[in-house]
Amino acid sequence: MRKVPESTVSRLSLYVRLLGELQGEGVATLSSEELAQRCGTTAAQVRKDLSFFGTFGKRGLGYSVPELASALRSILGLERRWRVALVGAGRIGMALLGYQDFRRQGFHIEAAFDADPAKVGQQLLGVTVQSDAAMDRALVESAIDIVIIATPGEAAQRVVDRVVAAGVKAILNFAPVKLHVPAGVALKNVNMAVELEALSFALVNTNRRTRRAPSKT
Amino acid sequence: MRKVPESTVSRLSLYVRLLGELQGEGVATLSSEELAQRCGTTAAQVRKDLSFFGTFGKRGLGYSVPELASALRSILGLERRWRVALVGAGRIGMALLGYQDFRRQGFHIEAAFDADPAKVGQQLLGVTVQSDAAMDRALVESAIDIVIIATPGEAAQRVVDRVVAAGVKAILNFAPVKLHVPAGVALKNVNMAVELEALSFALVNTNRRTRRAPSKT
DNA sequence: CTAGGTTTGTGAATCCATTCACAAGGCCCG
DNA sequence: CGGGCCTTGTGAATGGATTCACAAACCTAG
């Protein structure tokens, strides 16, 4: 298998989600063109993305919705149940803990940790926040696959080092810092501040171009 | 000014954040190499990024931390105060509303809306959740610059259309769907599900390569 | 069973971002 | 004041991802 671009993987997620909806609606078949339009890309891109993994369509006809959905779920590893742990039970952490959609996709948050003793013992949807000190052992014992970092920025790298030492191979980082992990550990970032600042940049730029009137007096 | 890649803008955000910290620590100067290492990129990349906007360093010496910080803040439009509204006051919405870091960066959430009457009237940090029906007028009257969409996926596109109609030019989307906006409106997505699924993909792939023992027994 | 109309799968071409490599510029020390 | 050392800024080269374009495959209808 050739090396798969990250952007392709992201798009596969979108495809899967759409296909799931269509499957619910009983749609039997769709073309790369339709799939592309509904996911905000091009037909050629869709076909190229899929071509990394095999051939799924019928020429002249398109793709079978249930078949493609199932194939993509398998490629992305979504048939499996993933054991997830959350580190940092602040506002974001607790919001994630309550976010039922993850569970529906097979990502089960099974443990949560926080360094603040006041947070320890809090409970949400069956998960009790444990002390930071308990983390290293618990990660191993619960065979955690994925750790979500939702700590303050200062604490994040230290947590990551411990998480990696515990053998975890995938980390999702919400802290607004760039983290370093050894090769073989997958790291993804969700950085809301970066996105907001990109919007800010876009606003000051398009204003310059479109010369909009100042918003008030 | 040449066209600036989006990836450059994202990195500028990281640079600004780091420079702010260094400025707090009283660091006077740093090289592209140092900046690069601390932000997980390369020196050449840093210099290329900056070169889109002008020349900020002194050869042989590096960059003045306060000067570069200030220049980048200006480029990103972070000196300005942005008026932000939140649509959808569920778990994620409320978490964002409570997230003080945004305000510190100049992004002030000044209004919140939700279609659920039970949510209307809830209050957090001085912002009261208003009814969905009040949104269209309030966006205009409060001169909102940026709208954060934190609704369920099904509702998101309809909300976006109304937001665009109200003249808002920048949208940050947390709903797990691909949204369509007309040209001239900036749209950024934060899609946690996509990132999690990318991790899932990485796990099933590296497992195949590294042939790790099954996690139990 | 053949012709016409579709749509896929994929090399080739294009476009865009990153990396390289080096001349130009600036500081420091003697 | 001049030589050595360091770091920037930037064209050129590289490397990846996207788009193009078309042959191959499949369906339907007659």
Image (tube, coloured by chain):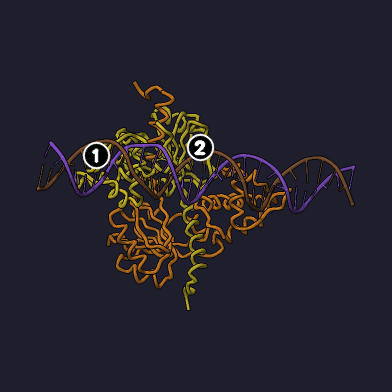
Chain colours: A orange, B yellow, C brown, D purple
Furthest-bottom residue in view? B217
Tell me, for residue B159, which label it has, or none: 2
Image check: B144 left or right of B30?
Answer: right
Q: Are marks 1 and 2 on the same chain?
A: yes
| Residue B117 visible, this angle | no
Observer-nearest of B87 and A213: A213
- The percent coordinates of residue A160 (x first, y second) are 34, 61
| Chain label for disc 2 | B
| Chain label for disc 1 | B
Quarter of the view holding residue D12:
top left
* Circle 1: element type: loop
Looking at the rendered structure, the kind of residue marked 2 is Val
Residue C15 to residue A93: above or below: above
Closer to the eye: label 1 or 2: 1
- The residue tagged 1 is B58
- The percent coordinates of residue A211 (x first, y second) are 41, 23
Q: Are there few (<14), some (14-19), or many (20+) residues within 10 Å of tag 2? A: some
- The percent coordinates of residue B172 (x first, y second) are 44, 40
> Sequence order check: which comes first, mark 1 or mark 2?
1
Q: Quadrant of the N terminus of chain B?
A: top left
- The percent coordinates of residue B42 (x first, y second) are 35, 50
Looking at the rendered structure, the kind of residue marked 1 is Lys
Residue B78 to residue A148: above or below: above
Quarter of the view holding residue A151:
bottom left
Q: Residue at x 53, y 43 (%)?
A: B178
The tally of labels here is: 2
Observer-nearest of A159 and A90: A159
Q: Residue at x 38, y 35 (%)?
A: A201
Q: Residue at x 58, y 53 (%)?
A: A16
Q: CA distance from mark 1 to mark 2?
A: 48 Å
* Circle 2: element type: helix
Q: Residue at x 24, y 43 (%)?
A: B62
